Amino acid sequence: MSSRTLRLALGAVMALAVTVTTFTRTSAQQEISGSQEQERSVRGIKNIVLVHGAWADGSSWSKVIPLLEARGFHVVAVQNHLATFEDDIATTKRAIAVQDGPVLLVGHSYGGAVITQAVNDPKVAGLVYVAAFAPDKGESPLQLLTAYPTAIANELRVDQFGFITLTPNGIREDFAQDLSEAEKTVLIATQGPTSPASGGTPITSVAWKTKPSWYVVAQHDRTISPDLERLFADRMNAVTITLSSSHVPMLSHPYEVAAFIRKAAAQAADR
């Protein structure tokens, strides 16, 4: 082999070694960066308990759950019976009790009343209300709904057992008007009949007075008045966002709601 050929061969080997080393270093740096990003995303609060509202079930959170889990959170969605307020509080407390560390508690609609009453637990680091009731002491969701009437009032039906359901038109026009027809059909089929005793029980313990709080206002809500939602957010001094949404922003705007929950988890960890 000539000296010129030898020099060219050695040069090629050295260039390949540099390329491999650079690629390996870059890959390692990307892996470390990704790991650090996931670590930052949970920042001390990894457990999120989601509480659904009336005329619904845990599947209300079906779009938000995978978005949170993908960021390293451990997510549990409770299944409220919607028969008595006390039973739904007990269900939520059981979900909190089995978590292995601090909890961020998230409530939608009537679920906001549940998390307001339920959290005398030191594990709960913060509260997120998503188009939700946040009653003060002595108030109940039904009382507040009467004081701030919305279109949904015309779509309530009481069955022979005393439970309330929404008409299909109520779900399509006043509960979830910004979802697809297929999604509305699923909500109609899976809605949970709700006892007046659930929404009619006054609050006796007000968690948002002692826990940091966040609030999602649904700008086009026809179930809970947006004015009432803003009142809730203002009086609890909550970190607030407003979404151009119906009563179910976690289904119509899941990315924004999931990002807001992640933000709350990070901020609650710093308090």
Image: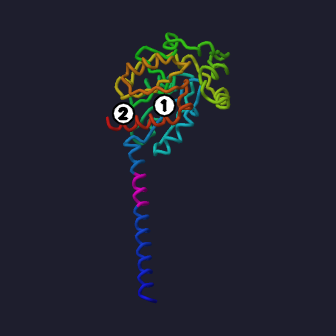
Image quadrant where residue 210 sits: top left
159, above or below 96, in the image: above
Camera-nearest residue between 245 and 159: 245
Q: CA distance from mark 2 to mark 1?
A: 14 Å
Q: What is the total number of numbered labels drawn onto the structure image?
A: 2
Element at label 2 = loop
140, above or below 36, in the image: above
7, above or below 121, in the image: below
Mark 1 highlights which residue? Answer: 92
Q: Earlier in the sequence, mark 2 or mark 1?
A: 1
Which amino acid type is shown beneath numbered disc 1?
Answer: Thr
Which region of the structure is painted magenta? 26-35
Mark 2 highlights which residue? Answer: 122
Give residue 52's position: percent from left, percent from top. 53, 29
- Residue 166 lies within the magenta run: no
Give residue 235's position: percent from left, percent from top. 38, 19
Instruction: Tell me the chief SS of the magenta region.
Output: helix
Q: Residue furthest bottom?
A: 1
Which amino acid type is shown beneath numbered disc 2?
Answer: Pro
Q: Residue at x 36, y 29 (%)?
A: 212
Sort mark 2 into few (<14), some (14-19) or many (20+) by Cα contacts within 10 Å: few
Image color mode: rainbow
Give residue 172's position: percent from left, percent from top. 64, 23
Q: Residue at x 55, y 14 (%)?
A: 150
Image quadrant where residue 195 sits: top right
Q: From the image, which quarter does the C terminus lie in?
A: top left
Element at label 1 = helix
